[in-house]
Amino acid sequence: MEYIDIEKDLIPYRFDISLAEEMYTLEVHYNADYDFFTVDLELNGEILAVGEKLVYGMPIFYDIQDNRFPKVPIIPYDESEQQTEVNWKTLSESVFLYVIDEEGENTG
């Protein structure tokens, strides 16, 4: 299964990723006071979203209706279903950002 691995030791950091044949830039931030992560999204240098909070089981950018956004859902999820939160302890340990393809399957 395909997932986006977040390198917590590098935060805040930016990286490029191909999603549904488009090249996006994601920037990951961590709020240490409240123990949560946010993601910024860019396409071709244009900022599309800033501070999108990672919420367990909810697709990132799910509430935004804009054709410039990724055409595939990215969902923070724990395959073992032991965790229900996205925080410093769980992200990239048991909770990963899974990329779901057009057929509703995990890719990879």
Image (cartoon, grey):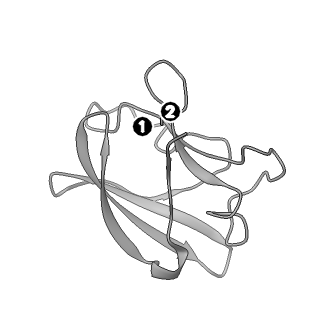
Foreground pick, 33 / 3: 3
Residue in the image at 48% along x and 33% along y: 107
Horizontally, residue 7 falls left or right of residue 17, namely: right
Q: Is residue 5 above or below residue 70?
A: below
Residue 73 at x, y percent in the picture: 48, 35
In the displayed image of the protein, which residue is found farthest to the right?
Answer: 82
Distance between mark 1 and mark 2 Cα atoms: 17 Å
Residue in the image at 74% along x and 56% along y: 85
Residue 13 at x, y percent in the picture: 38, 74
Horizontally, residue 34 falls left or right of residue 29, namely: right
Give the residue number, with chain letter if any, for mark 2: 100
Give the residue number, with chain letter if any, for mark 1: 64
Q: Quadrant of the N terminus?
A: top right
- Tally the marks: 2
Under circle 2, the secondary element is: loop
Residue in the image at 36% along x and 31% along y: 71
Foreground pick, 15 / 49: 15
- Mark 2, Cα crowd under 10 Å, few <14 / some 14-19 / many 20+, is many
